[in-house]
Image (spheres, helix red, strand yellow):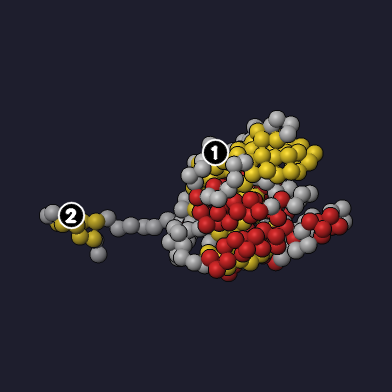
Amino acid sequence: MVTSPIRVTVWGENFHENSDRDREGMAERYPDGMHGAIAAGLTELLGDQVQVRTATQDQPEHGLTDEVLETTDVLTWWGHATHGQVDDKIVDKVYQRVLGGMGLLALHSAHFSKIFIKLMGTSCSLTWRNSADTELVWTTNPGHPIAEGVPHPIVIDEQEMYGEYFDIPHPDEQIFISTFSGGEVFRSGCTWRRGKGKVFYFSPGDQEYPVYHHPDIKRVLANGVRWAAPDRAGEIVTPSVVSQPPPIFTGRGLKEDK
């Protein structure tokens, strides 16, 4: 894993925090914004292991300038209402960065984000119901680093229901599966490798509920950041086409063509 500290950028849509309909409730649940709560949880649990900053969609270049991306080991992404307004050029930059080795945590409604759909290559559609269901998050892979220290199950008293069918590629690793009070099930914690990068999708975290203050959810996200970090520092390199001259065999040795 990358040597400490892991450089984490917590990206948030920052729409509900500022909309007329949601502003008052969001101020009560997330006075520093959802991105602020996620960032605070990572700092609380990981301490000196991380350097955490936030970026939001309403900032220039959505807060993801070349400088920011080049100094990010793990990017967390939360979006919901304005996926379509994310600049495709920024999405392409994030995509190339992931292929080069940057970790990505896609959270809750980020299943419909441009970057997650691009990485998955599927519609990423699902079923949903927002009626304050109780969610139980069951660990299906207890030996995985993301499940370390996580209770079985995590109990979330109120949460938006996400259910199957979830149109994603078969996960490389299934870490969590959720059940809801309506009887639905959902693959709520999945990982993939894309190029050199690691991708973790984790579904709990609707804006209408204070889920990112939940201690067990904070633990999952902290574990996810450590897991998604590049294996070695300085190893995030954008893939490129290379013209390789042919080698020349001389006897039993191998000599490069000059």
Q: Where residue 90 sits in the image (x, y, percent)?
A: 63, 58
Quarter the C terminus occupies: bottom left
Residue at the spot 73% in from the left edge and 34% down from the top edge: 181
Q: Is residue 68 above or below residue 132?
A: below
Q: Residue at x 62, y 63 (%)?
A: 44
Q: Disc 1 residue type?
A: Thr
Q: Is residue 172 above or below residue 213?
A: above
The answer to whether mark 2 and mark 1 are in CB contact below 8 A is no
CA distance for labels 2 and 1 = 51 Å
Residue at disc 1, secondary structure:
loop
Q: Quadrant of residue 23?
A: bottom right
Give the quadrant of residue 127: top right
Residue 255 left/right relative to 20: left
Q: Which mark is residue 58?
A: none
Q: Which residue is mark 1?
A: 140
Q: Amino acid at mark 2?
A: Phe
Q: If the image is split into quadrants, where does the N terminus sit?
A: bottom left
**Can you give x and y, in whole percent of width and height, for residue 138 in the image?**
60, 39
Q: For label 2, count other residues whose C-alpha is less than 10 Å away and answer few (under 14), some (14-19) or many (20+).
A: few
Nearer to me, 157 or 253: 157
* Residue on which disc 2 sits: 249
Find residue 231 and report its horizontal and vertical position in percent.
44, 58
Q: Residues within 10 Å of mark 1 (few under 14, many from 20)?
A: some
**Spot occupied by residue 36 in the image (x, y as percentages of width and height):** 70, 62
Tell which of 247 and 151 is nearer to you: 151
Which-is-in-front pick, marks 2 and 1?
1
Query: Nearer the N terminus, badge 2 or badge 1?
Result: 1
Relative to the observer, which residue lies in front, 144 or 118? 144
